[in-house]
Each structure stands twice: as structure tokens, then as C-alpha cells.
Amino acid sequence: MSEINTDDALEVALAAAIEAGKVLLGFADQMSERPEFEESETWTKSSGRDLSTAADLAAERAIVARLREAFPDVPIEAEEETSDARSKGPRWFVDPLDGTINFVHGLPMYCVSIALYIDDVPEVGVVYLPRLGETFHAIRGEGAFHDGRRIHVSDAAGLSDGVLATGFPYRRGELEHDNLANFGEVFYDIRGIRRMGSAAVDLAYTAAGRLDGYWELHLSPFDLAAGALLVREAGGVVTDADGKEDWLRGGHIIAAGPAVHAALLGRIKH
């Protein structure tokens, strides 16, 4: 496999995200015009709270087709139906619709997330919010950007200055750690907390300094892959809840500016 040019990879990922965004908006418009369309085109995943839609699949197929056309030898790990065997070397991580519950309920906080990793190192990341028309991107070593303008994590000095984000698993009744205790652990020490309903959006907004930090448990690699690179390239710190590097596959993450990250570390149980 020839070496991948990250500028070329970013161009393809941006185009794929925008194409997938158009697919999602098309479905969203049909859902708003025909309420019966939502029920007929929605089904549950493993949990009754966790939804998947025809929009997820259509958006994923559009992304996969574009990525495979440009990089036919690069494996793709996606949320819905594409999961090439794990291997060393380059790999795409794709979440065609992060924030499906928001999407189904007509809330604008959903996105397309695409990332390129090489030997488990994040190289390219794109998060695109089609309803809000916002694009975040990063290339390793070149900084993070929002609609073409460089972004940086917040300079909050600690939790008392922080507005944080988190989320809760759909299978919360089945899990030992459902994140509710962690919520209570930090709730009284922070300025505010937000629940966006999309890990990729939370990470992008943390990279942009809109949020001062983010943590969550029970996540999948395609939830985190692009957004984590955005935070790191924006000057933030990304680790698992133990302060180590197993955040991509380990399922739990803390992402924030240095001071807030240090304050959260040790509080988040998983």
C-alpha cells in the first residue's frame, strides 16, 4: 500500500462528509413533512433506546463509496454495516450519523464523523454538522479548524470555571457504571453541564473552546476517532479515564484543556 497523503485524505473526507450531510438533510426533510415516514424508517438496535435509521445506512454507504473510490486498499470501520478486519496500517473510522436520537427528534445536534488513523495514530479528522452548517477538521501536527479558522481549547483554570459535557449509555440499566455517579461527583464543582447527545459534537465543541471539557463512558471507536484528534490539535489533552492511551478502544474518555483535564482525572470511575 502506497503512503497516504494526508492533504488528499482530508479533501476526500470533507467531500464525503458533505455528501453524507446532504443525504441526512434529505431524510430529515421527509421526516418533517411526513410524520409517518419517521416510524416506517426507524428501527431499534441492541437497546430499545438506541435507534438506527435508513438515514444512517444511506449516509454510511455514500461515505464508504467515496472513500473506497479514492483509497481502495484502506480498511473502513463504520458504525452500521461496514467493518473490515482490524489490521496495522491505515484505517478509516466512520460514524455516518452521530446523534441519531437528536436527528429523529428534529434536534440539530447531530453530525458526520470521519477519521483516518495509521497504526492507531490519528492523522485526519472531520466532524460536520449538516443542519448547523459547521465543519471541523484537523491534520496531525497542523492544528484544528472550524470553518477554516484555527481553534483552540479553552483556558479554563479549573472545574469552577468550566462548562462540561457528558453523556449516558443507552444500556444504562444493564451496566455497572452508567456515569450517573460521575455526574454527581463533579456536578457541584462546575459552572455548568451540557448534554449534546453526540460524542463527536462534544469533542468538536471542546476543541473550539465552547465547552471546557468532556468525559463519557461506553463509547465506540467511531464515536471518538475524529473528535479526539480535533481536541489534541487544538491544544487539549485526551486520555482514557485512567490517564492512559486506551481511549479509542477502551470505551471511556476524558478530553479537555490541560487544567480541566487534570482536575477531572481521578474523579471519573468506569
Image (spheres, rainbow, N blue to C red):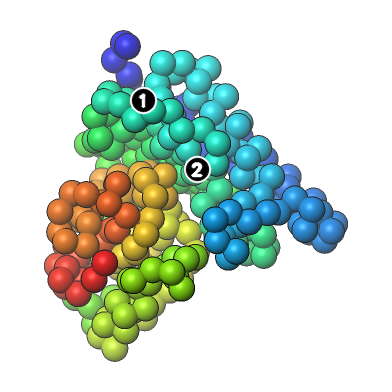
- Left or right of 148? Residue 41 is right
Q: Residue furthest bottom?
A: 188
Q: Quadrant of residue 180?
A: bottom left
In the orientation shown, which residue stands out farthest toward the front?
A: 174
Q: Is residue 137 above or below residue 68?
A: below
Measured in 3D between alpha carbons, the distance from the residue under mark 1 to the one under mark 2, in whole angstroms, is 25 Å
At 20% across and 71% down in the image, what residue appears? 264
For residue 157, the mark is none
Q: Position of residue 47 (x, y in %)?
A: 55, 61
**In the image: residue 84, left or right of residue 236:** right
- Residue 261 in the image: x percent, y percent? 19, 65
Quadrant hosting residue 121: top left
| Residue 173 position in % (x across, y down) | 46, 73
**Residue drawn 68% across the image and 54% down it:** 43
**Can you tell which of label 1 and label 2 is closer to the viewer?**
2
Residue type indicated by callout 1: Asp
Residue behind mark 1:
7
Q: Residue at x 43, y 69 (%)?
A: 174
Identify the residue under disc 2: 79
Q: Residues within 10 Å of mark 1 (few under 14, many from 20)?
A: few
**Residue type at tag 2:** Glu
Question: CB atoms at circles 1 and 2 under 8 Å apart?
Answer: no
